[in-house]
Image (cartoon, helix red, strand yellow):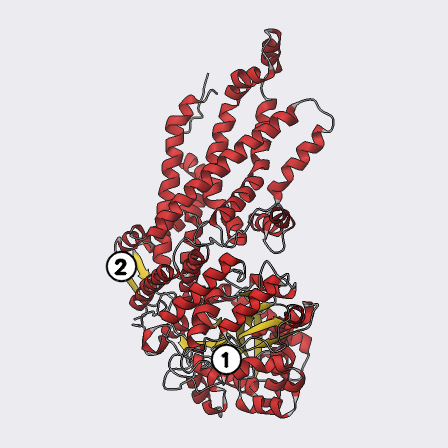
Amino acid sequence: MQKYAHFKGLTIPLLLLLPQLAITLVFFYWPASQAVWQSFLLQDAFGISTEFVWFENYRDLFSKPEYYKALINTGIFSVFVALLSLSLALLFAVMADRQIRGAEIYKTLLIWPYAVAPAIAGVLWIFMFDPSLGMLARGLQSLGVAWNPRLNGNDAMTLVILAATWKQISYNFLFFLAGLQSIPKSVIEAAVIDGARPMRRFWTIVFPLLSPTTFFLLVVNLVYVFFDTFGIIDTISGGGPSGATETLVYKVYSDGKGGTNLGGSAAQSVILLIMVIGMTAFQFRFIERKVNY
Amino acid sequence: MTFKLKTLTAVGAFALAAASPALAQTEIQWWHAMTGANNDVVVKLAEEFNASQKDYKVVVAYKGSYPDTLNAGIAAFRAGNAPHIMQVFEVGTATMMSAKGAIKPVADVMKDAGETFDPKSYLPAITGYYSTTKGEMLSFPFNSSSMVMWYNKDALKKAGLPEAPPKTWPEAFEAAKKLKAAGWDKCGISTAWTTWANIEQLGAWHNVPVGTKANGFDGFDTEFRINSDLFVKHLTNLANLQKEGVFSYSGRTNTGEGRFTSGECPLFLTSSAFFGNVKANAKFDWSNAPMPYYPDVAGAPQNSIIGGASLWVMGGKKADEYKGVAKFFTFLSDVDRQVKLHTESGYLPITKAAYEKVKASGFYKQNPYLETPLLELNNKEPTENSRGVRFGGLVQIRDIWSEEIEAALNGQKTPKAALDAANERGNQALRQFERTAK
């Protein structure tokens, strides 16, 4: 049995690959190399004076406590968002997977938040939890909770975590549900006959069989919290108060845009790039071994 | 872009169906950041100018928020496509003026075009912010405002306070305490634009420097002085009152302004340009007053500084185009046009003649709140501490300062430690700017 297509010469395979390669080069490698180059430069906003400074932008970054704070914030933020959105999505998927009346409606409704743009999601949550305007914030205050994300860093962090989680649950839910539906019913029925209760069935059969999905979602969620949560943070807290919700990607933006410090901003995005490559590689190398396909 | 604009011109020419040949018109692009009613003002000004003569045509384009417009202009310049006129907010002044070659000073534009232009006919408190120390105008003031204290008259009455608003900070804090006791328990007093109110304006209003070298006017080698006594005292007061629930922080920009119009905060310091919003939304009796001051600071109050935006002329354009820009600025400076802009939109007039004319008409008798910012700006002859501030990278520095002020208000740092850090981090940003601004 022939497993691979064989071509004579290199011309045709190269031609077939060309569109994909061109897209990758133009839209990924070229901008990424620009960022690397920019990270070695010190430039004014208009690009009139340019100085090549080697690693000064990087040294500068690592000498500032704010950068480490953003690093810690990113850690807290991503662990909570990934953990919450994965576990809640799994819970919802398991519930929706059962034979219940109106399951289709639940499924459809649960998918909706994914269609909401991050910035809009942020605005929705700030409308509910703004200490002056928010209905839910007033509820909290009347219960005696001193809710004030304008000044309290923990409140602000809680709010961005909730909003980012809410937004991502739909996506995770969709994949978990598809994963659950692809588990053969016969395996579960066999377990039922053997007398396994629902909890036991879940942990010994369903969860291990879901592991490819879980692993895929873990990688995707990590990329999400690192990059796509920018709009949520920008609309809810703008990185404040006092830098309490400033994540790495938000700092790239605020230094580059507000500060027109393109070199420092580029250096940060290069570090971010290396971190995500490293983490994805780590996941594939070590966590993937535990995945049963 | 060029193609699009050409199409626009062509379409515009057909629409006008004027007798003048469209091809002879020189196009002037004007990028701005005005929304809502202010956007209408911009569009109408361009239309009126285009109808007033047939050699030049001003084409306006909205480019988003102030920072967005600045960034769009910078990106366009890097791509060799800058507009002729760019509206830049006052914090971007140092960034613009340091970009030699990217911009052309307004004074030069007017002189080269042979337009009659007398810098002395403009209000110095406004043009001073956008001029060199020698008085050469760099950019053309467009929409200017200053910071005032808006107050809820109904609330003052209810709390048993005198009808006249508090004049000094100690009085304002006392009033806020009484207001809290009378039911305004979430917020007695607050400010929008945290650093503009509590650092930049506070310094000018008390004739205390925010930075050395005349607040940066005399050179980019300026250093901050925002950890001096006045700033520490003020922040200490605010932090203590925040704990008591008398002062309540309202965020870095003006997103918290709704707390005044909703009636939540009866004393609120923000821009005089808040006028339109208050008029449309406040369901109580209101007015505004000059910012409070500390009576124990000698010479206080001095004068306030402006906020808002000015029009910068970009470099590298054709002489004929600059002529059109100069004609447009002359058109904007017209006394009657300034009077109309001021009384209808609440922007401050930029010429002395316009201010005098509105004063003489008795307009301020009915609308005293529109004169408050002008009284503050002209309170005394500006000193080197009250002409304005000119710091490179101020957009980012304001964020740094806000971070530290927030840390003091939520008790993470003492006010002194927070301002020391704000000063130090601000200086680092200044040094970085100085290196690139050569």
Please identify the quarter of the rendering in which residue B100 is found: bottom left
Q: Is residue B32 visible?
A: no
Q: Is residue B101 left or right of residue B307?
A: left
Q: In the depicted view, which residue is nearer to us: B92 or B202?
A: B202
Disc 2: CA contacts within 10 A as few (<14), some (14-19) or many (>=20): some
Chain of the residue under the numbered disc 2 shown in the image: A
Q: Position of residue B63 (x, y in %)?
A: 54, 65
The front one of B317 and A92 is A92
Residue B345 higher or lower than B124, as above or below: above
Q: Amino acid at mark 2?
A: Phe
Q: Position of residue A79 (x, y in %)?
A: 45, 37
Task: Note whether residue A179 is visible.
Answer: yes
Name the residue located 55 percent from the left edge and 39 percent from the top edge: A168
Q: Identify the residue position indicated by label 1 in the image.
A: B141
Judge whether A62 appears above or below B427 on screen: above
| SS at mark 1 in the image | strand
Pinpoint the chain carrying mark 1.
B
Q: Position of residue B348 (x, y in %)?
A: 56, 81
Q: Secondary structure at mark 2?
A: strand
Using the image as rendered, state which of residue A233 and residue A17 is in the foreground: A233
Q: Tell us which disc is closer to us: 2 or 1.
A: 1
Judging depth in this view, the residue of A100 and B404 nearest the camera is B404
Circle on res. A113: none
x, y percentage for residue A186? 61, 12
| Labels 2 and 1 positioned on one and the same chain | no
Q: Can you identify the residue that label 2 sits on?
A: A52
